[in-house]
Image (cartoon, grey):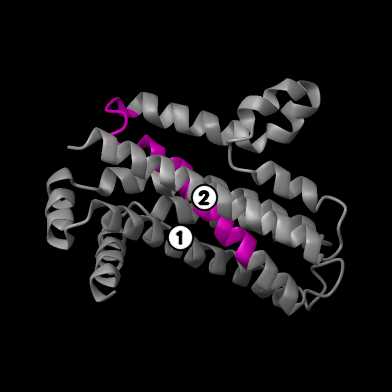
């Protein structure tokens, strides 16, 4: 366990030792400000839109995190822990924790903005259940986005430009999936594999509070999506080798 924690800590240190995190975080702050700069703000609407923003930002982070991995260092670490699977899972955990950090910022931001507006920013009082539920959904949306971004890994596609364009096209398609399926239902055969971010926004479209059934559905589909895309990436890297 100490070895695994060391891998996660190492990757976290490597990421924050670069400037790769600056632009995604700056863009997120701007996007969050665009939500909370005028009142009244719908609590549920703002939380689900934040999930979308977290997804997009973490796709970006996933793509840039791929570039951070040095092939030689990667091989050395895998040899040291004697398990490629352990290394790849530690990288997924690193991205999940990073998504949780960003989600924490996305949850604290509206609290600060509400205080600045004398508690009158939202259409109803912002409760602890809203913040806790929103934080978990944002974290899972971020994990799903980062996992999708990771498929642009240089070892899976050596043409970086093509890999990045393809990944962001998938991300945009994931966001518009619900609308696309309404027009062309047969696309469900293909699009089901994409992260269910648009499904989550649709689930809570007319909700005032989180309900257990709908929240559980959103939680499960986001978690499964992140795990599936992580598994796809790991399987691809193991097959490709070095």
Disc 1 crowd rating (10 Å Cα; few below 14, some 14-19, many 20+) is many
Quarter of the view holding residue 123: bottom right
Q: Position of residue 55 (x, y in %)?
A: 56, 49
Mostly what secondary structure, the magenta segment?
helix
Above or below 130: residue 193: above
Is 90 on the left-hand or right-hand side of 128?
A: left
Contact flag, marks 2 and 1 (Cβ < 8 Å): yes
Residue at label 2? 226
Above or below 149: residue 27: below
**In terms of depth relative to the viewer, which is nearer, 90 or 30?**
90
- Considering the image in quadrants, where does the N terminus appear? bottom left
Any mark on residue 96, and which?
1
Please give the name of the residue rendered at 42% of the width and 46% of the height, measured from the top-left corner: 231
**In terms of depth relative to the viewer, which is nearer, 228 or 110?**
228
Above or below 121: residue 22: above
Which of labels 2 and 1 is toward the front?
Answer: 2
Q: What stretch of residues is rendered in magenta?
A: 136-160
Please give the name of the residue rendered at 78% of the width and 58% of the height, measured from the top-left corner: 214
Q: Position of residue 120 (x, y in %)?
A: 83, 73
């Amino acid at each position: 366990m100490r070895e695994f924690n060391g891998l996660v800590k190492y990757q976290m240190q490597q990421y924050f030792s670069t400037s790769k995190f600056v632009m995604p975080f700056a863009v997120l702050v701007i996007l969050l400000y665009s939500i909370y700069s005028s009142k009244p703000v719908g609590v549920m609407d703002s939380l689900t839109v934040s999930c979308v923003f977290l997804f997009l930002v973490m796709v970006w982070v996933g793509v840039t995190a791929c570039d951070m991995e040095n092939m030689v260092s990667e091989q050395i670490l895998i040899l040291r822990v004697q398990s490629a699977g352990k290394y790849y899972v530690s990288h997924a955990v690193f991205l999940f924790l990073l998504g949780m950090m960003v989600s924490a910022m996305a949850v604290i931001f509206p609290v600060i903005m509400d205080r600045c507006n004398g508690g009158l920013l939202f259409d109803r009082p912002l409760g602890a259940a809203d913040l806790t539920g929103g934080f978990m959904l944002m974290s899972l949306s971020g994990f799903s986005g980062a996992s999708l971004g990771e498929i642009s890994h240089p070892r899976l596609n050596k043409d970086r430009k093509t890999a990045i364009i393809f990944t962001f096209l998938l991300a945009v398609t994931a966001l518009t999936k619900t609308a696309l399926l309404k027009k062309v239902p047969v696309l469900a055969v293909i699009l089901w594999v994409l992260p269910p971010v648009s499904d989550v926004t649709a689930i809570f479209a007319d909700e005032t509070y989180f309900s257990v059934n709908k929240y559980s559905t959103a939680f499960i589909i986001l978690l499964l999506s992140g795990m599936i895309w992580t598994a796809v990436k790991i399987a691809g890297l193991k097959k490709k080798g070095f």
